[in-house]
Image: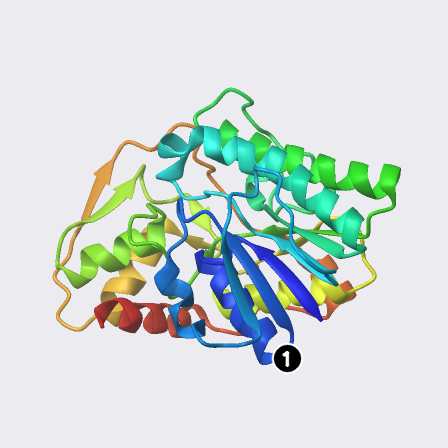
């Protein structure tokens, strides 16, 4: 198949490109490199099945030929991006989504939106099922991402209902693995950098807030399964194994020999979710998907990547 990926030079986009190229697909990838990094796709230089476009998807653009599949992964999404790229985040999830849905309609491609667990906000239901509408502060410090993804989902469903565009939506929970931006600001990459340098590990809040970490290879596999399924409603992809922020810090230290880092505590960020864990019963039933990489294995792979 001929596949278009927005955000291809990002953490998830580059791993998705690797998976699809390995399956024999032709991949055209776009990225404006605001948060993406060309080093993530440098290994694809010379691959005749891969083409890179330095392109901002918020700006309408023309591209030759038909596509069979469009994966929309473009969007700044890190903790640091909540303040640094607020407008870009909103524009990518609104106008960028709009433009790529138009491309899907023109070319007859199936479209997949990479949405986020952030649509649930600081959830009052735990774990979060797909039919939960969320608890989101529309003017909070995370609103540009939360509401951006919520709009992107609404836009995707509108094109499905009004224009008969063939669409899919996945809600991703806490991906981690190699190629994460070192300035990302999310908890796993922060802890690994601090622990490798024997610096104190900075925990925001008391560390009892929880996350569910899903290794990148599992997540991109789930995205492809969702794209190729007949299911057209939002579906959660993530690990149902919940872990506290404090426990993540301890596990990372234990995996690094001679790590002398101690935990230091800072005030928790506004609107930081207290609990984040997906209900993945739907993914199990519809996609026959569940995460396979144990957390200790995934963390060890990531530590070795950043050590070298």
- Residue 18 at x, y = what percent? 52, 72
Query: Which residue shows up at 49% across the image and 35% down it?
Result: 89
Going by the image, does 81 lie left or right of 169? Answer: left
Q: Dot 1 corresponds to which residue?
A: 24
- Residue 278 at x, y = what percent? 60, 52
- Disc 1 crowd, CA 10 A, few/some/many (<14, 14-19, 20+): few
The quarter of the rendered structure image containing the N terminus is bottom right
- Residue 46 at x, y = what percent? 45, 76
Going by the image, does 307 lie left or right of 211? Answer: left
Q: Nearer the viewer, residue 308 or 42?
A: 42
Going by the image, does 307 lie left or right of 276? Answer: left
Query: Which residue shows up at 29% across the image and 56% down it?
Result: 249
The quarter of the rendered structure image containing the C terminus is bottom left
Query: Which residue shows up at 28% across the image and 52% down it?
Result: 190
Q: Nearer the viewer, residue 249 or 299?
A: 299
Query: Which residue shows up at 47% across the image and 23% down it?
Result: 140
SS for callout 1: loop
């Amino acid at each position: 198949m001929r596949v278009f990926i927005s955000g291809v030079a990002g953490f998830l986009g580059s791993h998705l490109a690797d998976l699809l190229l390995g399956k024999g697909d032709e991949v055209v990838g776009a990225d404006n490199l605001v948060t993406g990094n060309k080093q993530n796709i440098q290994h694809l230089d010379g691959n005749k099945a891969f083409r890179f476009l330095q392109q901002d998807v918020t700006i309408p653009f023309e591209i030759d030929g038909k596509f069979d599949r469009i994966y929309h992964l473009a969007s700044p999404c890190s903790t640091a991006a909540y303040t640094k790229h607020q407008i870009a985040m909103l524009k990518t999830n609104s106008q960028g989504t709009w433009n790529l849905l138009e491309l899907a309609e023109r070319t007859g491609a199936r479209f997949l939106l990479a949405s986020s667990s952030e649509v649930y906000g600081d959830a009052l239901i735990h774990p979060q099922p797909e039919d939960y509408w969320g608890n989101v502060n529309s003017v909070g410090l995370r609103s540009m991402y939360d509401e951006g993804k919520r709009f992107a989902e609404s836009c995707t469903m509108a094109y499905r209902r009004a224009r008969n565009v063939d669409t899919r939506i996945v809600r991703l929970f806490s991906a981690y693995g190699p190629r994460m931006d070192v300035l990302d600001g999310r908890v796993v990459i922060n802890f690994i950098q601090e622990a490798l340098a024997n610096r104190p590990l900075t925990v925001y809040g008391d560390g009892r807030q929880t996350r569910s970490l899903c290794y990148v290879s599992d997540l991109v596999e789930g995205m492809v399964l969702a794209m190729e399924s007949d299911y057209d409603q939002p579906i959660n992809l993530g690990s149902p194994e919940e872990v506290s922020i404090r426990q993540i810090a301890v596990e990372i230290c234990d995996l690094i020999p001679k790590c002398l880092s101690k935990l230091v505590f800072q005030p928790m960020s506004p609107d930081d979710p207290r609990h984040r864990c997906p209900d993945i019963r739907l993914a199990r039933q519809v996609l026959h998907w569940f995460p396979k990489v144990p957390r200790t294995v995934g963390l060890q792979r990531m530590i070795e990547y950043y050590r070298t």
